[in-house]
Amino acid sequence: MQSDVYLAGVRARSPKENKLNRIQRLFECAGFPDVIKQGDLTAIKIHFGEMGNDSYVNPILVRPIADKIKGLGARPFLTDTNTLYGGSRANSVEHLQTAMKHGFGYTVTGAPIIIADGLQSDYYREVTIDQKHFKKVKIAGEVAQANSMIVLTHFKAHLPAGFGGAIKNLGMGCAPAAGKSAQHSAKPIFNAELCSGCRTCAENCPQGAITVEKKISSVDYQVCTGCGKCLRVCQTHAMDFNWLVEVPPFMERVTEYALGAIKGKEDRVGFFNFLLNITPDCDCVPWSDAPVVPDIGILASRDPVAIDQASYDLVNRQLGLVNSQLQKNHEPGKDKFQGVWENTLGNLQVDYGARIGLGSKDYRLIEV
């Protein structure tokens, strides 16, 4: 079945064409008023950006969406989940501080912030999905409890996912640390040169799988469950995952989690993809590289698979920017995401999403 995806371009020559007004038109055209009911607690799922990153969705662009939701008699709140790898968003206190420093205060966005998975990423609900990799998935509590949700995604390239769109924002972004670890399903590796010998990883390992001798940590992989706690507490970043292991099953696991994130409110979710400042990296990195293609516009749809497929196609139609991380595939029609990260397979997200009933790859693009 074909899904509608609405596109608002970036050119503007009058007040009616500014991004704020175009976002409001997209909200109406995509049928989001039918998604939200009076009295809803409506999650606006967004990425607040890692400290040092500046390519996340501009908080000014969130305000028209929050105002539209409030105009329908619902109560919006901005939300995201804490990170698995540490950084400036590893717990709710630092996560909130980062969001505020990046401009996501109430006076700008018109909505409060609630970190969805609790203070230390241990607040979640188990959701049954009965799929290939997971029978049940762990979804952040505030996302699971929200009556409706609008998902705002900065569409960009990503290692190892190929691209980060609505599916990844749902799957990885709505999961607590334990859910993120389950999706990666990888065991930690360590860099002895970075290890300070502080023993924090060993003291915090729930399985007792880590030992520290002098300045070298060792991991008992037969005991390790891959929970990722060591990554979260290591102050020198000596602990890490091999993010490139088994990319196809990783993408399937992310997509199954996306299915779990909307379970129970399949008709109560809307999606915006911002094809602006399309960078080679996730907003999780503490920097922002030059974009790999020109700005395209903003998309809206009620189908996460369709909006990601449309975004993927629109990016690949562009002429790649030479002064960027794009190493090849500059020509229109070539895969820009493999031009940045050669071994990635971003299309697996939409293929598998269509297969498990998350949405449809078949779409109709409508310019507004």
Image (cartoon, rainbow, N blue to C red):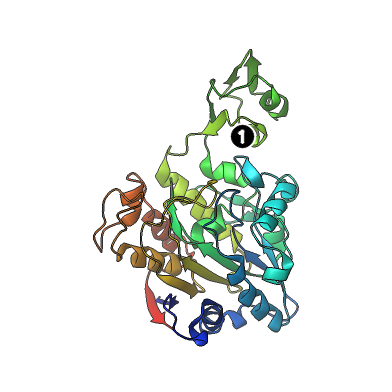
Along the viewing direction, whichever of 324 and 336 lies nearer the viewer? 324
Residue at x 73%, y 49% (from the top left corner): 92
User: Which residue has dot 1 on it?
Assistant: 231
Residue in view at x 71 percent, y 55 percent: 115
Q: Which of 290 and 147 is in front in this view?
A: 290
Q: For residue 86, what is the image quadrant?
A: top right
Residue 132 versus residue 360 in the image, above or below = above
Q: What element carries label 1?
A: helix
With 237 as the anchor, is 155 left or right in this view? left
Residue at the far top: name it. Answer: 214
Badge 1 crowding class, 10 Å Cα cut-off, few under 14, some 14 to 19, many 20 or more, is: many
Q: Quadrant of the C terminus?
A: bottom left
Q: Is residue 156 found left or right of 194 in the rendered image?
A: left
The image shows residue 125, relative to residue 34, as above or below, that is above
> Residue at image x 49%, y 74%?
301
Q: Residue 349, can we see it?
A: yes
**Residue 268 image-quadrant placement:** bottom right
Expressed as whole percent of the image width and height from the top left, the position of residue 338 reads 32, 50
The image position of residue 182, as x and y in percent, is 57, 42
- Where is residue 63, by image quadrant? bottom right
Residue 127 position, x and y percent, is 64, 56
Question: Which image quadrant: the N terminus?
Answer: bottom left
| Residue 131 seen in the current view | no
- Lateral position of residue 203 relative to residue 222, left or right: right
